[in-house]
Image (tube, grey):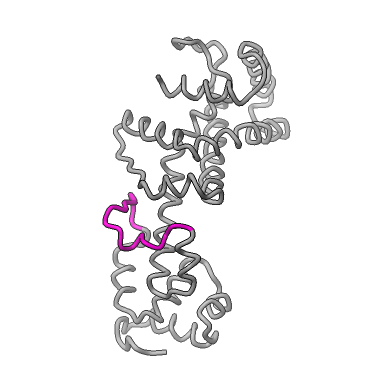
Amino acid sequence: MSAEDEINEVVTAALPGDRAARLLYDAARVDELAYHGFKGRDYQVFEGELYREVQPIVLGMIRNGKLARLAQKHSERQGWGFFINPDDLLLLKSNSEARDMIMVDMVTEALKKLQRDLQAGRGWRADHNGPRGASCLTSYFIQVCVWMFRRAYVDWAQERVKWARLHSVYDFTEDAANEVGIGRLLGATDYVVEDEVFGTNFEEILDEQAPETQAVVRLTVMGFGGTEVADKLNISHGTVRNRLTRFRGPNKGVGRGGA
């Protein structure tokens, strides 16, 4: 069964109404939005309605692994390497927050692509001549989400690795880390993410520092302010400044045991 047919089945089961009626409604809506160039307040209302309609469907497809499987098939057809770690699939099945993070990122990018395609006269058509005719706009949009899943997943997985590295340097919430499934990431030889989280030079320099300095730098890189870093590590704000100054200074790697 093709990806399009699988998505059509999911959408048909999730949404009420006749398929032909949905196609007529979608065609009329797109014609109306085209009059204003697929932008403005009416288009924003359309985007909001589409987002609310696909949200529960997409979350269900992430939870049961169907969306990830379709995304892998799409990547294979495009000649892209795309590995999804089995630990991540288990986490996405059990953790609603993880599903929400990927869903929001993926759907946001899919909405941008849909608007670009509609403005360029590409994408969804009510008169599509596929083996089973046209899909409704909702089914087409979920297919766009499948195309966007690869990037959203990689970004999410990189953030997990970043957090796991941070905990390996300064273990301030080990139990919480294990609860969300990152406790074994650093030691896992089978965990693959497509791109490095940090640049090689930065990572090599940071690895030479004392663990106390590494903790401050990693929290700072993640976007925490000086006061937040001090609170998380239970040190003074002055100590945070000193460690950052030492790391940024000309003698990186010297004085590994400092404050």
Q: Is residue 25 above or below residue 180?
A: above
Place of residue 60 in the rendered image (x, y in percent of width and height, measured from the top left): 54, 36
Residue placed most toward the observer, 174 or 217: 174
Residues drawn in magenta: 180-196
Q: Position of residue 86 (x, y in %)?
A: 36, 46
Give yes or no for residue 92 being in the magenta stretch: no
- In this image, 135 relative to 17: left or right? left
Q: Is residue 176 above or below residue 100?
A: below
| Quarter occupied by residue 127 | top right
Q: Residue at image x 54%, y 24%?
A: 139
Question: Image point 46% across, 49% down: which residue?
Answer: 91
Magenta part, dominant SS: loop
Q: Is residue 248 visible?
A: no
Q: Considering the image in quadrants, where does the N terminus appear?
A: top left
Residue at image coords 28%, 52%: 190
In terms of depth relative to the viewer, which is nearer, 94 or 194?
Answer: 94
Pinpoint residue 142: horizontal percent, then vertical percent: 53, 30
Of all residues shown, which one is farthest toward the left?
A: 189
Where does residue 246 sit, x and y in percent of width and height? Answer: 39, 84
Front residue of 109 and 49: 49
Closer-to-camera residue (57/255): 57
Q: Quadrant of the C terminus?
A: bottom left
Instruction: Inspect the magenta stretch and tell me whether residue 193 lies in it.
Output: yes
Q: Quadrant of residue 181?
A: bottom left
Query: Please, is residue 248 above or below residue 139 in the view?
Result: below
